Amino acid sequence: MKPKILLVDDDSNFRKLIKETLCLSLSYLCVKQAGDGKEAFQKIENSLPDIIFMDIRLPGENGLVLTKKIKKIYPDIEVAILTSYDLPEYQEAAIENGAKYFLLKNTIIPMGIINMVQDWIDRHGKT
């Protein structure tokens, strides 16, 4: 079964960059995108992703609130927060709300994202 990834960010260019990065190295991934929380929940209900890369600042509900809701309903989905805001209170809130990772957009190394997904694949035996 192919690992399923959902990218949730209001910046379509950033989503495209992350998708291209993942698909170039791990071509067997199923990568979907959402621009806000409402669209994200629709995609979650329809495709039940394994990993969600989530921005904090989104139209409507923010990514921290959305992460908490997702983890309550779908505790097995891993959430990685991607943000430009290097604030300790955001990192603490992300972890408290169920995010497994907290990554800064301006310091993300493509190989880091690929390694994170590969680690998930290794732990769950999916390819």
Image (tube, rainbow, N blue to C red):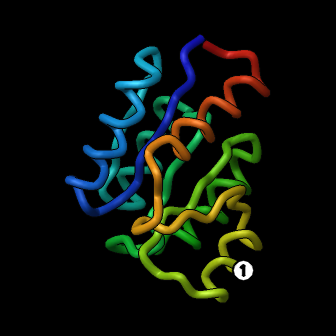
- Quadrant in which the C terminus appears: top right
Q: Residue at x 34, y 49 (%)?
A: 34
Query: Residue 30: image x %, image y %?
Result: 43, 24
Query: Residue 121: image x %, image y %?
Result: 67, 25
Q: Residue at x 35, y 59 (%)?
A: 9
> Which quadrant holds residue 8?
bottom left
Q: Residue at x 35, y 51 (%)?
A: 39
127 to the left or right of 20? right
Q: Amino acid at mark 1?
A: Glu
Q: Dot 1: what SS?
A: helix
Rendered view: 54 above or below 17: below
Rendered view: 119 above or below 62: above
Query: Residue 124: image x %, image y %?
Result: 76, 23
Q: Nearer the viewer, residue 18 or 58?
A: 18
Crowd around label 1: few <14 · some 14–19 · many ≥20 (10 Å): few
Q: How many marks?
A: 1
- Quadrant in which the N terminus appears: top right
Query: Residue 80: image x %, image y %?
Result: 59, 55
Judging by the rendered image, the residue that carries numbered circle 1 is 92
Q: Nearer the viewer, residue 5 or 48?
A: 5
Q: Residue furthest left?
A: 13
Q: Residue at x 61, y 62 (%)?
A: 67
Rendered view: 21 above or below 91: above
35 to the left or right of 48? left
